[in-house]
Amino acid sequence: MIMNRCSFCFIACLLFAVAFGSIHTCHAQQDSHWTQLRGQDGSGKSPTSTKPPVKIDFDQQVLWDTEIPGTGWSSPVYNDELIWMTTAVSVEASKEEIEKKLKGDPLAKIKTLAKSVELRAIAVSKSDGKLIHNVLLTNVDSPEPINPMNSYASPTPALADGKVICHFGSYGTWCLDTKTAKSVWDTKYVVSHSVGPGSSPVVFDDKVILVCDGTDKQYVAAVDLKTGKEIWKTSRPPIRATNGEYQKAYSTPIQITVNDQKQLVIPCAQWVAGYEPETGKEIWRVDHGSGFSVSPMPIFDSGLVIFSTGYMRPEYVAVDPSGTGDVTKSHIKWRYKGASTMPSTVVNDGKLYAVTDKGIMLCLDVKTGKELNKVRVGGGYSASPLLAGGLLYVANRDGVMKVIRCSEALETLATNRFESSIMASPIVVDEDLLIRTEKKLMRIRK
């Protein structure tokens, strides 16, 4: 049972902090773009002036919906007119082929695979939903197994300087020109994901950061945005667990600034660590325990990095990131049992909001970790909450999106039912919602 749960852990993935003393977030200027997973600064918050729709009339408010070929749980991103995402068009394997490939795998009962898969980059017009680009990046014969609830296209793309970075874990990373959709460069960093890729690329300054926490090896790499050439590669801290399934992780970095020093903060199995973006040198590390398959992005607020420890007993842990070396004994400020293992968190006005995989909505005090409220919203969740216009938009795998007032009361204002599952995190376009379901990309106006 333990092995089944550790494999199940990944599944999709698939993440404005408040200034505090001399520590603050380093985020992009507020605008109407959404250029990476969970927005420019990874906070999951839209500009404060945005007020998307609450109760949706699907007959009147759907500006457009576009069928997206294949399967992918990557969230949409956009800059200017085009909305980008990735997808995987699979050829189904036969039952005999699946059994042969998974023979002897102790996790075979909760894995599946395709006979072959085309990995593609998709671009859709923001104004009318027209499919503009459908670019074949590579065709993979006999791909590795994935969890049935994952996809071969779960990492969210990143946009920067007229380029879109499309990442598929060990299957490769491609940089395309956003105007022509032609390849600028491609590279490949190979690890064993066990149940499919999950960590999304992020761009900081002139570097693309790729997190490679596999069952066989664990490291972080930075490649040049213009050329794709490696700038640095840093191994993760040593992990006590000897079973590779307990060494993997799928988190995505955030960037913060501490005492005028930039840091990349990236959780992994057993550890969370801060790195110098320019060199990859480790600044600090904290041993959070035996957690693994960490998928949620960390968040930064009130001088604290807050992250989930992943499976098996998920906790939120708050760390002061101002130290150096191993600061496990001195810099952990609080812990809260009962964290999410997939959706990331959002912070607003000193409160942390989270929805767990099993549909429990939490409100915690950021500085102390004290539970302020906990309510059941129902359903199973992989997508991360969106905070927009003072409201939380939480969408689950049954295709139900609830709109909850961003306050300690956690009052549900609306329940909207879509035609298929939602695994990608909702985002905003101007005053509209952009929702990727299992089948479609939808723009829903106010």
Image (cartoon, helix red, strand yellow):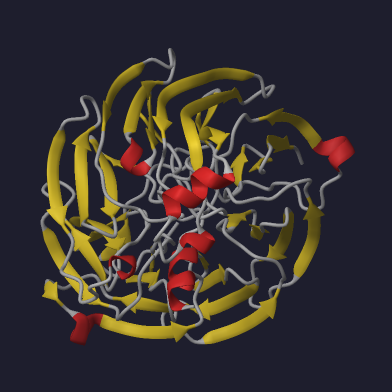
Where does residue 54 sit, x and y in percent of width and height?
77, 52
Viewer-side residue, 266 vs 93: 93
Residue at 77 percent across and 41 percent down: it is 446
Viewer-side residue, 381 vs 43: 381
Look at the image and tell me whether residue 343 can be seen.
no
> Please, is residue 365 above or below residue 145 in the view?
below
> Please, is residue 368 above or below residue 242 in the view?
below
Residue at 35 percent across and 43 percent down: it is 169
Where does residue 423 sit, x and y in percent of width and height?
60, 51
> Please, is residue 134 above or below residue 269 in the view?
above
Where does residue 370 sit, x and y in percent of width and height?
49, 87
Viewer-side residue, 419 vs 374: 419
Where does residue 243 sit, x and y in percent of width and height?
27, 71
Q: Quadrant of residue 400?
A: bottom right
> Please, is residue 117 above or below residue 233 in the view?
above
State how many labels appear: 0
Residue at 77 percent across and 30 percent down: it is 63
Look at the image and tell me whether residue 273 can be seen.
yes
Left or right placement of residue 128 versus residue 78 in this view: right
Q: Residue furthest right?
A: 59
Left or right placement of residue 287 versus residue 178 in this view: left
Residue at 54 percent across and 24 percent down: it is 123
Left or right placement of residue 357 versus residue 304 in this view: right
